Amino acid sequence: MRLSLIFFTQRGGALARKLAGDLECQGHACDLSGPARFAAEAGAQPYESLEGWTADRFSSRDGLIFVSACGIAVRAVAPHVRDKLTDPAVVSVDEAGRFAVPLLSGHVGGANDLARTVAALTGGTAVISTATDVNNRFAVDQWAARQGMAFDCRALAKEISAAVLAGEPIGMASDYPMTSPLPKGVTAGPAELGFYVTSRTGQPDPFPKTLRIWPKALHLGIGCRRGTPPERVEEAVARVLEERHLARGAVRDVSSIDLKQDEEALRVLSEKNGWPLVFYAAEELREVEGEFTPSPFVASVTGVDNVCERAAVKRSGGRLIVPKSAWNGVTVAVAEDVFQLS
């Protein structure tokens, strides 16, 4: 996770500095801020105002950690709270490290897990209050978030959580194999309410009430003429996804050849949809194994016989499920991960 930590006292700075170091050892990317008079000692950046610090980081970080009283954190983030599906995880930990409290986005944003991590590092206690956690029950939104998946209907997600708490059976269907036993209260058999893990949009719902969960398993490979308008690339992608009954929510990223690094249309597509943009050299694409649709013209321009198919397969490490589809100067291919649930 991309985490920002902030503290307000000398003692808080010492804890925040240790936390940032420990979290980075676990693979998180951390930045640390504090008052100017304590910043240098803690190896932190001084902040000009709490309001400005929060506004800057609320939309650009996966999680915020306040080494402070809960009230300070609550007042800081309150003006920015919008949606549980997009708000970052917010955790408050006291400067003695005794209690780590998830304040926002406990499940989808990962604040509950982040609080547990912080508590484990400080030797304190994570104060978790969400009903499914308190009752040690399966939470579909948290389960999906932990595996980088998204869902299509928050109302149904809430209904599933309520049913789990009431002891009612919840159905599960998946196009992908699961490596661990089904969670308690979840069945692969018939049920009135359930969830379906799929990257496809064309199949019928397996349950009368079905929450669709999209795994980030699809990778787009794209080629285009120099200076192609952004709307043309967006339309080409939309056409492929619609015609092949693939969920936009299941797309993980976009890739192409490094000759296209300055192509505005690809940058706009990436930023608009929140899809990371990855580029490969011609030599890397030539080394991808498989059968691809060759183009002598593309080879003469780029040094490789096919860009979109090879880029998609290179990025996914899986199989090509949509070969090159050309429309109005844009080529799109789709590859799928070897995806497993846990």
Image: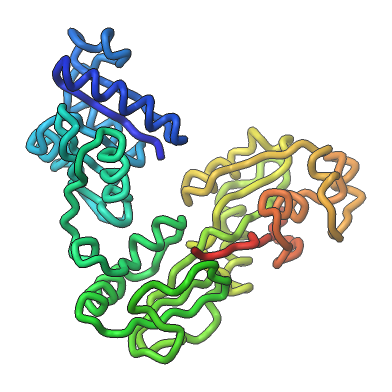
Which residue appears at 56% of the width and 75% of the height? 175
Residue extending farthest to the left is 71
Asked whether residue 52 is in view, the answer is yes
How many marks do you count on the picture?
A: 0
Residue 277: image location, x then y, percent: 59, 42
**Viewer-proximal residue among 304 and 252:** 252
Above or below, 285 against 334 in this view is: above
Location of residue 50 (image quadrant): top left
What's the coloring here?
rainbow
Above or below, 281 against 165 in this view is: above
Judge from the rendering whether residue 211 lies leftward or rightward of residue 302; answer left or right: left
Location of residue 235 (image quadrant): bottom right
Residue 340: image location, x then y, percent: 57, 64
Residue 288: image location, x then y, percent: 81, 49
Q: Quadrant of the N terminus?
A: top left
Which residue appears at 27% of the width and 50% of the height? 112
Asked whether residue 210 is in view, the answer is no
Which residue appears at 24% of the width and 81% of the height? 167
Judge from the rendering whether residue 82 lies leftward or rightward of residue 32; answer left or right: left
Residue 292: image location, x then y, percent: 84, 59
Which residue appears at 34% of the width and 90% of the height? 192
Residue extending farthest to the front is 123
**Viewer-proximal residue among 65 and 167:** 167
Location of residue 301 (image quadrant): top right
**Viewer-proximal residue among 92 and 181:** 181
**Viewer-proximal residue among 178 and 288:** 178
Judge from the rendering whether residue 3 lies leftward or rightward of residue 220; answer left or right: left
